[in-house]
Image (tube, rainbow, N blue to C red):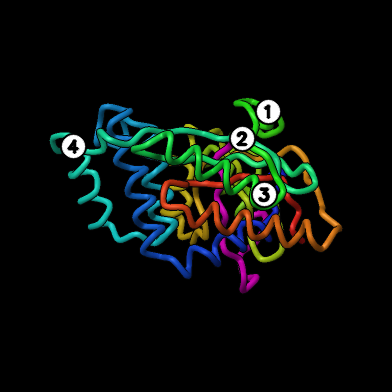
Amino acid sequence: MSGHSKWHNIQRAKGAQDAKRAKIFTKVAREMIVAVKEGGSGDPDNNTRLAAAVAKAKASNMPNDNIKRTIEKALGAGGGDSYERVTYEGYGPGGVAVIVEAMTDNRNRTAAEIRHHFDKYGGNMGATGCVSWSFDRKGVIIIDNEDGDIDEDSVLTDALEAGADDIETDDSVYEVYTAPDDLAAVSGALEAAGYAFLSAQVEMVPQSYIALSAPEDIKNMEKMLDIMEDNDDVQNVWHNYDGA
């Protein structure tokens, strides 16, 4: 998530994903269904939102059969009609900027729940645009290099040839950045080249980070992120909390 994506933040999210794999599949499936509805096509080549959702599904290890069935369901009568995208913005403890992306069939319910999550842990929900100005929307692909056997020059060459904008190293991963609409094409080319992904999705990348020092703020921030990510309506939570 950032001009760096701060792999420790992604690791945290990945840990939650590993523990809740079925819920992650449900959320990604919902994202694909809505993408088909909004894009008017079940063909990822002709629907950039769907292409990005499929890339995210593959990086989450969703089986290809599940992906195919989800798209077929979306193309059926009324598929995904009841869901809509909605975004909430606000501040966590210590002024941490938070963006919550949701898909809901009841805006009033979801807004009340997200506002409650902010309030309960020392934050506050703000107006649209109050924090999003400090984030950049980018495609972010995280390539696993835990074994340290992937050469940085090779990744850089392959990523740039695939159409990526930039690449950075962070701990045991390579972070590849793309324009949002280029995510699917770049991830597809890198997958074909044999790279394994830990994550591949369009993210709101913070321009700077905030480190919390007060133990109570740190505890509340972690709890707030956990409960938001566990909410059935929430697809993504982006923030500029430096949790290192």
The label on residue 75 is 4
Q: Which residue is mark 2?
A: 89
The earlier-in-sequence mark between 1 and 2 is 2
| Within-10-Å neighbours for mark 3: few <14, some 14–19, many 20+ | many
> Amino acid type of disc 1?
Cys
The earlier-in-sequence mark between 1 and 3 is 3
Mark 1–mark 2 contact, CB under 8 Å? Answer: yes
Alpha carbon separation for disc pair 1 and 3: 21 Å
Q: Secondary structure at mark 3?
A: loop
From the top left corner, tell me how far across and down residue 129 is, in percent.
63, 25
The label on residue 130 is 1
Q: Residue at x 86, y 58 (%)?
A: 213
Residue farthest to the bottom? 147
Is residue 146 inside the magenta stretch?
yes
Alpha carbon separation for disc pair 4 and 1: 36 Å
Q: Residue at x 73, y 62 (%)?
A: 219
Q: Secondary structure at mark 1?
A: loop
User: Which region is colored magenta?
Assistant: 138-153
Establish if 56 lies above or below 86.
Answer: below
Alpha carbon separation for disc pair 3 and 4: 34 Å
Establish if 69 lies above or below 133.
Answer: below
Is residue 202 inside the magenta stretch?
no
> Amino acid type of disc 4?
Leu
The earlier-in-sequence mark between 4 and 1 is 4
Q: Residue at x 34, y 38 (%)?
A: 105
Count every numbered label the image shows and give the total.
4
Q: Which residue is mark 3?
A: 5
Residue farthest to the left? 77
Q: Secondary structure at mark 2?
A: strand
Mark nearer the viewer, 2 or 4: 2
> Amino acid type of disc 2?
Glu
Q: Residue at x 80, y 47 (%)?
A: 94
